[in-house]
Amino acid sequence: MKKFMAMLLILVMVFSLAACSSDSKESDGNPTIGVTIYKYDDNFMSFVRRAIETAAVDKAVLEMNDSQNSQATQNDQVDTMISKGAKALAINLVDPQAASAIIEKAKKADLPVVFFNKEPETSVLASYDKAWYVGTASAEAGVIQGELIANGWKANPDWDRNGDGVMSYVLLKGEPGHPDAEARTKYAVETVVAAGIAVEELELQTGMWDSVKGKELMDAWIAKHGDAIEMVICNNDGMALGAIQSLNAAGYFNDGKYMPVVGVDAIPDALEQIKEGKMAGTVLNDAKNQGGATFDLALNVANGKDPLDGTSWTLDAGKAVRVPYVAVTIDNITFAEEAYK
């Protein structure tokens, strides 16, 4: 009986210590920050998520959520995070149009909210004094990608297969209505034309940021247009990787048969394709700094501080931190690789 009671006492002490340990970060004064990602299996967002988690070590308790590309799921997750006592919210919206609904939830709980990567409308952000945004200037990626395409086209006359001086392109677009997809599509092509290059659009369809959809569309376009395609423009690297899979299967990148493919994000898999000579270039969408800035702002406001306190970030007139894009080719590949370490 004594042995039994001794063992029981030990078990009680073990469970008590475990409970204390689980609450240790809270007791150390680290706030809880509720975070949602629109979907975990998005290539780029997986790196933003990692950057947030890395930045939070020993500074905050994160309530991480995969919204699985469902705005209804995300709305429920926000309610749960609020009920669990989150001190701030960091929201990667599924649907940018849902920002006002998220803000209403945050207002009722008097909680600050930092949106990131998918930008709410300026008027919606301005409607709440405890709401901010971390992301990029959407047009910038398109302009930089357009410059990259134009420079490559002029430096490589052999890309113009039929020698007619016209760039015949196909374009894999991201999610329709998404600010980044719309801006990248518009400004990439406009920048090429502004550089004095005549263009012909063979195809433009949405691949929804997805590699599989990118491959399926590229398969269909190769079957329809064959070597008439002279440039593959992709709103993100995920779709670019799918297009490259399709092009590989069609015999490109072998025996001198080449197809220029450009993307946006500079994710590690895309950088490998650039090093292998299968991708002409991409645009660094700085996941490390987007995640870092998101956490910095969320931590400050969770602690009742000014969002920029102790940081090097700046807010524009729209209450947004803009992380700059950078063109990436084989010439500066090392710089891009450093961004993912």
Image (cartoon, grey):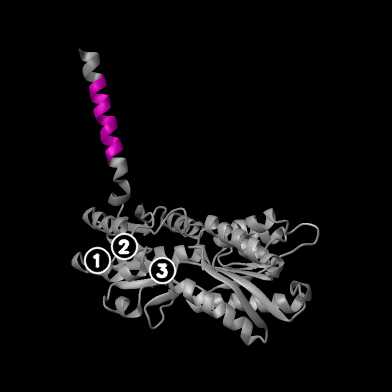
**Residue type for callout 2:** Leu
Q: Which residue is mark 2?
A: 89
For the N terminus, give its image quadrant. top left
What secondary structure is found at the residue carrying circle 2? strand
Alpha carbons under labels 3 and 1: distance apart: 18 Å
**Left or right, residue 133 beside residue 80:** right
- Residue 209 falls inside the magenta stretch: no
**Rendered image quadrant of residue 267:** bottom right
Mark positioned earlier in the residue sequence (2 or 1): 2
**Residue type for callout 3:** Lys
Residue at 70% from the left image edge and 60% from the top image edge: 278
- Residue 72 is marked as none
Identify which residue, 9 or 124, lies in the foreground: 124
Magenta residue span: 7-19
Mark positioned earlier in the residue sequence (3 or 2): 2
Residue at 31% from the left image edge and 62% from the top image edge: 89
Q: Residue 246, percent across and down?
A: 64, 56
Identify which residue, 102 or 259, lies in the foreground: 259
As drawn, which residue projects farthest toward the right?
A: 255
Identify which residue, 219 or 34, lies in the foreground: 219
- Residue 106 is marked as 1
